[in-house]
Amino acid sequence: MDAPRLVALARAGPASSGASRPSRPRPARHAHHRPPPIGKQWRAQPPRGEDRGTSDFLETDRLVLRAFTAADIDHLLALDNDPEVMRLINGGRPASREPVGTRTLPRLLHDYPCREPRGYWAARERTTGAFLGWFEFRPLEEHGPAVVELGYRLNQAAWGHGYATEGSRALVHKGFAELGVERVTANTMAVNVRSRRVMEKTGLSFVRNFTGDRPEAIEDSEHGEVEYQLTRTEWKQPR
Ligand SMILES: CC(C)(COP(=O)(O)OP(=O)(O)OC[C@H]1O[C@@H](n2cnc3c(N)ncnc32)[C@H](O)[C@@H]1OP(=O)(O)O)[C@@H](O)C(=O)NCCC(=O)NCCS
């Protein structure tokens, strides 16, 4: 997969040797959904006139991923209160402030004792600063970054613009190139075609179907779950 265009931020270390993968021209399908062309160079500085937040983790052409803070509770409440966003996650049931504050937020603020401590990153649009949702790039082991789970949840208004793919590609690139990640895994309901498409466009491959253990009744959950993955070895291979 082509290396995504990233902006190196203060906490980012130097790209390790061999980080850039040979590029392969890809067919232009659904051009209106495609992220902007992906380049290979890293920019050492943010564009003129743009502030760099101290909690920023990663920048792409259109996104900034930053660490969550407790002040994000209203963003999270609005996101989890959209039944369409949550339809294939918990059946679309309404969210309330108390569990978002006591369960969701602490999960998103959890620090891992690995090199990059957080497992979830809030996404904002670079030009407008609008909160778009979040990305998960969470170590499955508390003390080691070798296996990380990729996930995403965006506001409905942000769907269909390639944001999920753009953020996921950048995280995967950073994970393999800088953070010592060996394998990226992701799973979703089998019927969540948008999410599966993002996994595929990020370079992950289908591994298996399995039966999930979902406490809530969700329409179409009888089709089960799917798991995708990308290993560092696969990522390094030219495609
Ligand atoms: C999953 C989600 C993050 C995708 O975000 P997004 O920014 O729209 O994703 P992208 O624009 O990068 O890519 C979406 C892809 O799905 C495709 N897609 C959209 N609707 C589709 C449909 N009904 N059937 C098949 N493909 C569809 C798009 O065409 C696009 O692929 P393309 O670029 O090849 O055309 C977003 O829909 C979301 O937040 N959903 C709710 C939460 C969720 O389900 N999270 C995943 C749980 S594991």
Image: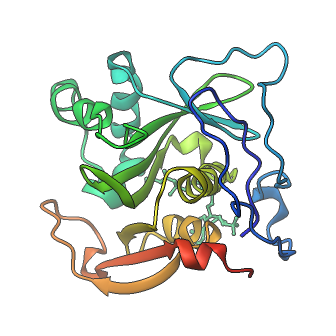
**Is residue 199 found left or right of 43 in the rendered image?**
left
Q: Residue at x 80, y 72 (%)?
A: 22
- Please tell me which residue is depicted at 30% across the width and 30% down the height of the picture: 109
Residue 146 appears at what percent x and percent y?
38, 61
Q: Quadrant of residue 58?
A: top right
Classify the position of the C terminus by image quarter. Answer: bottom right
Residue 9 rendering spot, x and y as whole percentages: 65, 30
Outermost residue, left side: 215
Q: Residue at x 29, y 39 (%)?
A: 113
Number of numbered markers: 0
Q: Quadrant of the N terminus?
A: bottom right
Q: In the rendered view, would you say 110 is above or below 35? A: above
Horizontally, residue 79 falls left or right of residue 47, namely left
Residue at image position (33%, 22%) is: 73
Q: Relative to the observer, which residue lies in front, 199 or 20?
A: 20
Residue 140 vs 59, above or below: the answer is below
> What's the coloring here?
rainbow
Q: Position of residue 170 (x, y in %)?
A: 63, 51
* Residue 190 can be seen in this image: no
Give the quarter of the image for residue 70: top left
- Of residues 107 and 236, the one nearer the viewer is 236
